[in-house]
Image: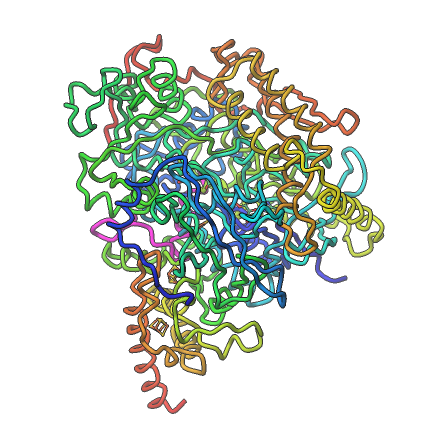
Amino acid sequence: MSGAYAHEYNAETRRANRQRAKPGRSIILKIKRCDGPGKPSRWESFKVPVEPGSNVISCLKYIASHPVTTDGKRTTPVVWDSGCLEEVCGACTMVINGRVRQSCSCLIDEYAPDEGDTLTLEPMSKFPVIRDLWVDRERMFHALRRVKAWVPIDGTYNLGPGPKESPEHQQMRYALSECMTCGCCLEACPQYLQESDPEKWDTSFIGAAAINQVRLFNEHKTGKRLKADRLEALMGPGGITDCGNAQNCVKVCPKGIPLTESIAAVGRSTTVHAFTRFFKGR
Amino acid sequence: MAEQRVIVVGGGLAGLAASVRIAEAGLPVDLFSMVPVKRSHSVCAQGGINACNEVARQQGYSEYEHFDETIYGGDFLADQHPVLEMANWAPNIIDLLDRMGVPFNRTAEGYRDLRLFGGSLFKRTHFAGATTGQQLLYALDEQTRRYESEGKVKKYEFWEFLWPVTQGEGDEKRCVGIVAQDMRTMQIRAFRAAAVVMATGGNGLIFGKSTNSVICTGGAASRCYQEGAWYGNPEMIQVHPTAIPGADKLRLMSESARGEGGRVWVPRKKGDTRRPTDIPEAERYYFLEERYPAYGNIVPRDIATREIFDICVNEGMGVDGQNQVYLDLTHRDPEYLTRKLGGILDIYEKFVGVDPRFTPMKIFPAVHYSMGGLWTDYTPGDYMPDVPKPAHKSGAPVPVDNKMGHGLTIGAPNNMMSNIKGLYAFGEVNFAYHGANRLGANALLSCIFDGLCNGVSVVNFVRDSGTPGVDGLDQSIYDRVVRQEQEKHDRLVNSARSATGDEAYNPYRIAKELGDEMTAASTVVKTGERLERALAKVAELRDRYAKVELCDAASWTNQSLSFARATGDMLILAEAMLKAGLLRKESRGAHYRKDFPERDDENFFKTSIARFNPQTQQSDIEFVPVRAPLVLPRARTYGKADTKAGKPQPAAAHA
Ligand SMILES: Cc1cc2nc3c(=O)[nH]c(=O)nc-3n(C[C@H](O)[C@H](O)[C@H](O)COP(=O)(O)OP(=O)(O)OC[C@H]3O[C@@H](n4cnc5c(N)ncnc54)[C@H](O)[C@@H]3O)c2cc1C
Ligand code: SF4
Ligand code: SF4
Ligand code: FES
């Protein structure tokens, strides 16, 4: 099973594991590999020495300089995507022990505390694989264009400050604005399916991340100006009514974004919008 | 004739601000980035962005003081006019970001909240939680997406810049495009452009582990340098005082932790094994507060770093006998901390497993930022005092007001242009603004300022009737560079096929040895002898690199190839850093020479300029006077308690 949240370790287990973990041990990384689009995938295992503070990325780096499997076979370094290494850029998302998450914040001591423990790494299943653990998430950025996720300012000339805002409202927007386009919510969502044909992106389910962005920009005084456009983009096929309310998304979001709350709020807005549109006879 | 295109390489804050500004002016932009721009390294910035504001102004602060602080903070190595212009633009830049929807923290009444940051006694740092860089990057990413939707910006994400295409020699050399590679298909091809903006960020990976993201190799800057672009102040590398040691990265604990009241200390008793919370106040050594009564924990970074280094390495007083000190926030209300610093406290908790709201953090310095970068030119604005001014006193009348155009002649085509015509450098890759030490929360400002202010210069250069278009240029100019890069590529791929398997030629191994050597020789404390040894080591690594061997011969998405190629470029930049550091026989800002501990204005009130010598394949270093007609150099003491400077200044009155 992929994507959802099998093997979720709660905070206590992780803390206990961390305390128990022995330095100087080795663990096994079992990695699902694929040489490129249309190529078959295969599993390869690597034995990796770990130290306190090791994470999945440092293990992959170790493999890059020692690309030899547990069978003693020389292979190629594993390809993966990463950037910030502090869970803020969203690049390094993958499925680890069956659960989608960022690999940079996945500490080995917390997930594989004993000698010889195995950690499985798979690419996300909802996006086309480029190679090994690296997937193509362009569709997520396309979704941001689809819902016009920006504030339509007049231009970059000096026109004074933006709208005043209460601290409560700022805190609310800030929470929504932390989305790092990682795709965890989409990987876990039963309604979001892989679609490699860009032509179909505008009519396939858009997913929780972009719906949350609609709420974010509709909450901004100037951003509101495009509210109608955004809601309409969510009212056609692949829009908000495709959401089955399974609530998997909110459970896997690493930034703790209140996604179901956002979906509900945007759902209400689309209903209101549909009514006004009806009465205006458009 | 079709409208000329502009290429922007890099989609961090600098590249995005430039793209938006240039597209807005009507020129089509081709935007290249190794990562989706929304994941650029700028996303890591935590603490905030500086600008004079109304509250500070009414307490006596001004744009001019921001300028003066930045020059003083940079130990008088920055060329001065651009810094003045940047400080004067800062409040307008904050307003613009505010309009774009950045969720800046708010006061009860709904105004933008402010915090204290290093090197200033005034609250002048604007912030969005502790993920300010992320929020600013997203705002600019959104505006760029808007232009992308309108077809005015074309993005090339997962494309790596390989080499600039130039035409002509010497002063006439002009950049007319780039050669880049698709990181998935590995296709290499040339792109024409009337101007190219490099906005490729920093080079922390040269030091192995740093606070930087994984793509911050400096490779792109090095390639321009090898093609003839000058590199300014390569030896000036900032080591941030407070980072969490880690296996793959040194994660930053932002200066905002100290700005929000964080205190740095060690137990007074060496080898004290008690838990930090059990050590009574009187038995803690708050060494920054004792040594710098005026600024205390918010002294600039180079000073804090050297003091922490001194406590741990020279005095042996590090916590648990190791190289680490406490950064303590536990005296503040946990809820307040979550609201102001949540993002970074989460990082600490996630990676260390301890909640810093209740237990002091253990931190140590880490390589963080490059003040040095591609050398750039400018046309000064209209402010030209008869003699450079002495220190500015808060509240005193300012010598020049905050209008635009005093620092730079806005739109002059040579603003932030390198010595190669049509090749610009914006953001961290630009050497301007920060001199020998960058003040916290000034980097984001300089990146956005470059894009917005100097983007106009790019537009004017392209539209200038004296600038010929590139459509008619002979294709062979481009083909030559494509061939050069294709050959390099093929050589690397083939090395995997004929590999001997000898570890010495493994690119990761070479890069690691480089990082270890650079960290040991060329960070907090340098000496001539150690730098010379490091130069010898880099020469050895370069010899080995000539026989580098990949372990992946794939012609599809070959990541190790990209890394191996960048390693060669890192070695070349490292040599320039070491050599300039060796020749700068003084101490200034982040550059501390134990064998020359004083600043020497007579000989080194100068920018070091590195030029790549294609014959020797090494750098030639020249020292040229700092362009400094506005402020007179003065001793940089930050009111250190025991210096000759006299009485310490009053404690932060506005905290
Ligand atoms: C952890 C951390 C915290 C920080 N906090 C602050 C702060 O609070 N306040 C502050 O003012 N500053 C801060 N800084 C500094 C600041 O974040 C950086 O200086 C700034 O973000 C650099 O932005 P940039 O636009 O120049 O480049 P970057 O954001 O680094 O972007 C570089 C771009 O260039 C692209 N690129 C690079 N090489 C190539 C190539 N060969 N081909 C194609 N594209 C390429 C990349 O893909 C990327 O898009 C912090 C830095 C760090 C490391
Ligand atoms: S609530 Fe909707 S978006 Fe979230 S997982 Fe369920 S179906 Fe997907
Ligand atoms: S909403 Fe959360 S899970 Fe979804 S992309 Fe954004 S950060 Fe990732
Ligand atoms: S590398 Fe950026 S989130 Fe993991």
Q: Percent position (x, y) of residue B443?
A: 46, 38
**Residue positioned most to the front:** A71
Q: Which residues are magenta?
A: B87-112
Whether residue B466 is visible, yes or no, is no
Horizontal side of B445 relative to B451 (left or right) equals left
Q: Please check the rendered image and state whether residue B110 is part of the magenta-colored stretch, yes or no.
A: yes
Whether residue A3 is visible, yes or no, is yes
Look at the picture and state if B504 lies above or below B462. Answer: above
Q: Percent position (x, y) of residue B274?
A: 19, 24
Determine the residue positioned at 26% across, 18% down: B271
Determine the residue positioned at 43% across, 24% down: B72
The scheme the figure's colours follow is: rainbow
Determine the residue positioned at 48% across, 12% down: B594
Q: Percent position (x, y) of residue A196?
A: 56, 72
Horizontal side of A198 relative to B258 (left or right) equals right
Foreground: B547 or A98?
Answer: A98
Look at the picture and state if B616 lies above or below A203. Answer: above
Q: Percent position (x, y) of residue A268?
A: 29, 78
Foreground: B268 or B219?
Answer: B268
Which quadrant of the view contains residue B285? top left
Q: Please check the rendered image and state whether residue B457 is part of the magenta-colored stretch, yes or no.
A: no
Horizontal side of B45 relative to B172 (left or right) equals left
Quadrant location of the C terminus of chain A in the rendered image? bottom left
